[in-house]
């Protein structure tokens, strides 16, 4: 399929987990994909090879997403390399889970900076080139934790809720330039985080999910592809929960 043939995408945090799945899914639909990573160089090289095997161009940037100057340089490099930028996926993020009484100021600041400030940095950086070309897609990877909250994740939930507010505001600011801004809010996904759960913890987790299973990263990526495509050209400012029914 060629839903995104010859489009140019940038994915933050694209070397592992959901980000990796998004990079490969965008490439499967014909997009050239640049992505950032923070430290996982071997994983980044592996993703590069997989994209290039599809006869598409790919560039990996070692970048600290929470650093505004770094974000600007990455976007400038992508535009210079590919002559345009059609899709931004703000996926980079971390967790520092603790109950509020044990959460340090550093835990709070690190998560807000890496999850929310990074989305601001990259969204600001891409807004000018997207406005100039009078079109683009910004897709923010939020979480159901930002929709309903989650004990032990005050910092993460606040950051992901902030991404939803950012999504809605940018959607209104950029709509007149044919730029659609939406958010995807995953539930529990099969990543390194859920792999650490004990069988008892996993069983308890599944009782919360009407579909009685966790999501595969590819199921999140499929929704991103839809929002990045022309099929979603009249959708903006929305939050799509991909959670097996938890939020309903």
Image: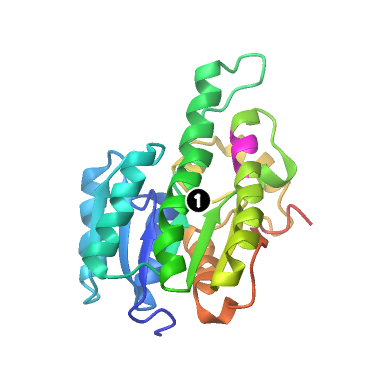
Residue with the mark numbered 1: 190
The image quarter in which residue 70 lies: top left
Res. 46 visible in picture: yes
Give the residue at x 25% y 50%. 61
* Residue 67, placed above or below residue 224: above
Q: Nearer the viewer, residue 137 or 188?
A: 137
Horizontal side, residue 31 vs residue 49: left or right = right
Res. 213 visible in picture: no
Where residue 87 sits in the image (x, y, percent)? 43, 66
Horizontal side, residue 147 vs residue 181: left or right = right
Give the residue at x 64% y 77%. 234
Give the residue at x 57% y 68%. 180
Give the residue at x 51% y 66%. 224
Where residue 182 sits in the image (x, y, percent)? 60, 62
- Say which element carries label 1: loop
Q: Nearer the viewer, residue 41 or 246?
A: 41
Q: Residue extending furthest right?
A: 248
* Residue 166, placed above or below residue 115: below
Q: Residue extending furthest bottom?
A: 1
Q: Read off the magenta span.
A: 156-160
Give the quadrant of the N terminus.
Answer: bottom left
């Amino acid at each position: 399929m060629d839903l995104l043939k010859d489009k140019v995408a940038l994915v933050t945090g694209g070397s592992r987990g959901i980000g990796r799945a998004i990079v490969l899914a965008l490439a499967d639909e014909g997009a050239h994909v640049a992505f950032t990573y923070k430290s996982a160089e071997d994983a980044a090289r592996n993703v590069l090879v997989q994209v290039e095997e599809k006869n598409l161009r790919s560039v990996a940037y070692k970048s600290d997403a929470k650093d505004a100057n770094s974000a600007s340089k990455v976007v400038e490099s992508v535009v210079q390399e590919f002559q345009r930028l059609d899709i931004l996926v703000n996926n980079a993020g971390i967790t520092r889970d603790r109950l509020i009484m044990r959460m340090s100021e550093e835990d709070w600041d690190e998560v807000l900076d890496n999850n929310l400030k990074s989305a601001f940095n990259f969204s600001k950086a891409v807004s000018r080139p997207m406005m100039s070309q009078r079109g683009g897609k910004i897709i923010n990877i939020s979480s159901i934790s930002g929709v309903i909250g989650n004990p032990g994740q005050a910092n993460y939930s606040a950051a992901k809720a902030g991404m939803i507010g950012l999504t809605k505001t940018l959607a209104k600011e950029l709509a007149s330039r044919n730029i659609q801004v939406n958010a995807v809010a995953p539930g529990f996904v099969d990543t390194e985080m859920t792999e650490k759960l004990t069988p008892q913890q996993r069983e308890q987790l599944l009782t919360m999910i009407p579909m009685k299973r966790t999501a595969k990263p590819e199921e999140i990526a499929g929704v991103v592809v839809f929002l990045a495509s022309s099929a979603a050209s009249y959708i903006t400012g929305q939050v799509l929960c991909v959670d097996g029914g938890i939020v309903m």
